[in-house]
Image: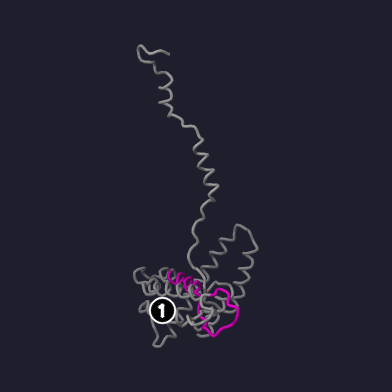
Amino acid sequence: MDSSIQDFMDSCNSDNSCSLTTNSTITTNNNISNSLVGSSSPSGSTTTSSRYENQKRRDWNTFGQYLKNHRPPLSLSRCSGAHVLEFLRYLDQFGKTKVHTPICPFYGHPNPPAPCPCPLRQAWGSLDALIGRLRAAFEENGGKPDTNPFGARAVRLYLREVRDLQSKARGISYEKKKRKRPPPQQQQQQQQHHQQLPMQLPLHLHHHHQHQLPPPGATQ
């Protein structure tokens, strides 16, 4: 079981796919990844989707194997959010992401200039992607959304905690990039363009204005 998990972790750190896989599959996935980067064919999105489905299936099968090797053995129907957290913490021993402790001089430094004894952990992005695939696979295999252990509140809180901890420890922001606003000069030009447009009356008002007779006694 450890060798299977180790293969999975190697895949996480080699191509960020975070799939539960074998060594031969890792090589295949890396080749596919390289071909996708260098290709602009329309079938790229289809290949990516197929690759995602393959990863999801492998993740699901290996998690099932993890449950069988659990002591005592654990059935999927009895799997809870607590067991998912146990699984995620188990994966940390195979992590390759340096997470600095608060007492480390490189705490919050995105590019440490020297090595340090801080522990290696699973990257938040890898764990978040893994849980997303397992959550989808659970429901695709007959599980109900309201009993999905991968969507449990405890799992969401754990992932959020890992994200915040690693963000501070590594000096990296995981916040989504906000949509960029146009430069002030471009905004000003747009406003001036709208102000210069002539105001046009609606057609029926414009017609009425042209043919309206002056009141009696008025001079033209």
What residue appears at the point 55 percent right and 47 percent down from the top-left corner? 185
Q: Which colour scheme appears in the figure? A: one colour
Give yes or no for residue 128 being in the magenta stretch: yes
Residue 165 position by quadrant: bottom left
Residue 139, percent from left and from top: 40, 69
Question: Badge 1 is on which residue?
Answer: 85
- Span of residues in magenta: 109-135
Residue 213 position by quadrant: top left
Q: Give whichever of 17, 62 is nearer the camera.
A: 17
- Of all residues, the one furthest to the right in this rendering is 38
Residue 37, percent from left and from top: 63, 64
State which quarter of the image contains the C terminus.
Answer: top left
Of the residues shown, which amino acid type is indicated by label 1?
A: Leu
Residue 131, percent from left and from top: 45, 72
What residue appears at the point 55 percent right and 68 percent down from the top-left corner? 51
Q: How many marks?
A: 1
- Of all residues, the one furthest to the bottom in this rendering is 71
Vertical side of 157 occupied by 118: above or below: below
Q: Give whichever of 113, 47 is nearer the camera.
A: 113
Give yes or no for residue 218 being in the magenta stretch: no
Report whether 97 appears left or right of 136: right
Residue 177, percent from left and from top: 50, 61
Label 1 element class: helix
Q: Give whichever of 137, 152 is nearer the camera.
A: 152
Crowd tier of the residue under label 1, counting other residues whose Cα lies within 10 Å: few below 14, some 14–19, many 20 or above: some
Q: Give whichever of 125, 212 is nearer the camera.
A: 212
